[in-house]
Image (cartoon, rainbow, N blue to C red):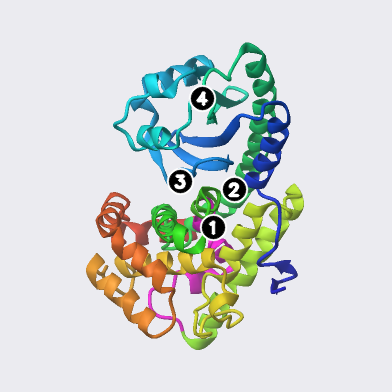
Amino acid sequence: MLKFNGIPLFGSVDSLTGRLEQLHDRILESTPGIARIACALYDPDTDLLKTFINSTHRGHAIVSYEYPLAESKSLLQMAQQGSCRVIDDITQEILPGTAHSNWLIEQGYSASFTLPMFSGKQFLGFIFVDSNQAGIFTDAVQRDLILFCNMITMTIATEMSAVHALLATAQAAREFADLRDFETGKHLTRMAQFSRLIAKGVAEHYGFSDEKVEHIYLFASLHDIGKIGIPDRILLKPGRLDPKERAIMQGHVNKGVQIIEKVLEDYQLGHLADARVMVNIVACHHEFLDGSGYPNGLKADQIPVEARIVTVADIFDALTSQRPYKKPWDVSRAVAELERMVTAGKLDPHCVAALKFHQEEVERIVIEFRDEDMATFQARAVSAIEG
């Protein structure tokens, strides 16, 4: 097994999806008619409900789906009141018109039970339980399902809390690095947004679950966390680096993995699937498919797909952003350069194609999260160094 500083890059570990499937099997022992259980996460920054994990025994799962909570009166009321919802006859109560409603009707499900998820007072999202049997959700069945759903909620809340604690620790170091590096917080936001677009675009090809896409989105912004260990004279040098300086700069990958190792050790999170994604991104986002990258010269399938995604996002953002030594490229020119690197055998063609396919959304991200002008940045950087 390929390892980086002793950490497996492709570790086979448990996932939330796997644990949900186990709980589904237990539910089927008492209530055989449960065809599907799915969890959607709520993003308060965008007001979007996003498909996350599911266990589907009948029908096919809906994936890569988002929907504004504010546009569903019934779900919004449940989130506000903490109440449950039972639909005994989906064909009579659910009208077609949205992608989710159309999908639900197509599956032939007859009844559904929906429960909001909370961690303390924090609204996390919803659990959706569907059945092919109309009227299955009696009071007794609901009582049993609430107990199981509480177990599901606790499982998700525990892992998400651990992930956010991990992110918060790494974020503190990252924010310090942001004061010293031209790669600002907006760069990191763009990185996360680009990475999520690409991950969704290649999800079918690479067999990504919504859970995997969410982890890539969460951890993409931490790719260069190791730069906190690079001296200012190199990190803030206005011109290009000489070979010796470049070697020092490239050391940020090893430093980044060391930081992540420490965080994982402190929180005892090394077993989590999302921790593997984090390590893979930090360790491998400067590797190229032809083996010309660093620090280990990995080739092709030796490089985890999540790292290939972040590599494309990082290069694209560098091309379309202003730097002390260059003006920003327009999106079309930057995409053309990525395609040239695909032809040269360096970048994943599917990742580049996914970014190009979403070019309109990419343009929006570039504009919405544009950095401050360079003169303002340089003044801020000098002030940070001197004060």
Cα–Cα gap, marks 1 and 3:
26 Å
The answer to the question of whether label 1 and label 2 lie on touching residues, with beta carbons closer than 8 A, is yes
Mark 3 lies on residue: 63
Q: Quadrant of residue 155?
A: top right
Judge by depth and name the residue closer to the eye, 73 or 368. 73
State which mark lies toward you, 2 or 4: 4
Mark 2 vs 4, N-terminal side: 4
Cα–Cα gap, marks 2 and 3:
25 Å
Element carrying mark 3: loop
Residue 321 in sight from this viewpoint: no
State which mark lies toward you, 4 or 3: 4
Whether 227 is among the magenta residues is: yes
How crowded is the residue under tag 3: few (<14 C-alpha within 10 Å), some, or many (20+)?
some
- Asked if residue 91 is positioned above or below residue 192 in the image, the reply reads above
Amino acid at circle 2: Leu
Mark 1 lies on residue: 222
Q: Which mark is residue 112?
A: 4
Element carrying mark 1: helix
Amino acid at circle 3: Val
State which mark lies toward you, 2 or 3: 3
Residue at the extreme top of the image, as rendered? 139
Judge by depth and name the residue closer to the eye, 177 or 286. 286
Amino acid at circle 1: Leu
Mark 2 vs 3, N-terminal side: 3
Relative horizontal placement of residue 71, taking residue 302 as reference (left or right): left
Q: Quadrant of residue 188?
A: bottom left
Say which quadrant the N terminus sits in.
bottom right
**Residue at 45%, 20% in the rendered image:** 89
**Residue at 32%, 56% in the rendered image:** 371
Where is residue 195 shown, x and y percent of the image?
Answer: 43, 58
Mark 2 lies on residue: 167
> Residues in magenta?
218-241
